[in-house]
Image (cartoon, rainbow, N blue to C red):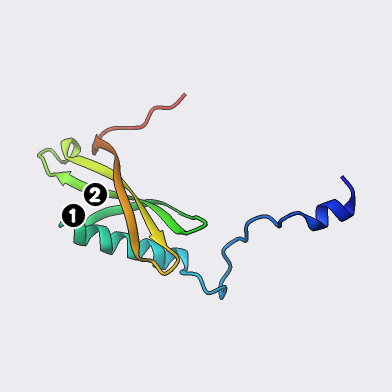
């Protein structure tokens, strides 16, 4: 590929950098947890993932759905939350339900 051709192609998507006018990852995490909690009426247990998207942010939020005794049998759910660039929730969906004592097995 010639240098001229490479220079004229669209640049790769920009990475999130401090000061670029975009919500930071920690603020996106708090925003996802707070807004999902407001919608579901349950406090999140953890944020298991957060990643930038072209529109803003995507986060995976773990929520306690059914508390049981012993605690290892409590039911949790993982919700995928979409945020715009300002941190406003635009969509969410439950992507997984599992017991607290369950271990992912991959391989």
Circles 2 and 1: CB atoms closer than 8 Å: yes
Q: Is residue 15 left or right of residue 32?
A: right
- Observer-nearest of 86 and 46: 86
Q: Position of residue 100 (x, y in %)?
A: 24, 39
Q: In front here: 37 or 90?
A: 90
Find residue 30 and report its image quarter: bottom left
Q: Disc 2 on helix, strand or loop?
A: strand
First in residue order: circle 2 vs circle 1? 1
**Does residue 12 lie above or below 85 as drawn?**
above
Point out residue 60 in the picture as x, y percentages from the top left corner. 36, 49
Q: Residue at x 58, y 68 (%)?
A: 17
Residue drawn at point x = 60 percent, y = 60 percent: 15
Residue 40's label in the rendered image is 1
Residue bearing the label numbered 2: 63
* Image point (63%, 57%), residue name: 13
Classed neighbour count for the residue bearing mark 1: other residues with Cα under 10 Å, few (<14), some (14–19), many (≥20): few
């Amino acid at each position: 590929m010639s240098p001229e051709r490479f220079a004229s192609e669209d640049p790769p998507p920009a990475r999130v950098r401090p000061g670029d006018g975009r919500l930071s990852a920690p603020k996106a995490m708090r925003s996802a947890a707070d807004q999902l909690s407001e919608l579901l009426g349950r406090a999140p247990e953890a944020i298991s993932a957060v990643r930038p998207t072209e529109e803003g942010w995507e986060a995976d939020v773990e929520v306690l759905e059914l508390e049981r005794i012993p605690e290892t049998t409590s039911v949790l759910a993982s919700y995928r939350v979409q945020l715009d660039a300002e941190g406003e929730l635009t969509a969410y969906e439950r992507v997984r339900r599992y017991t607290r004592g369950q271990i992912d097995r991959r391989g």
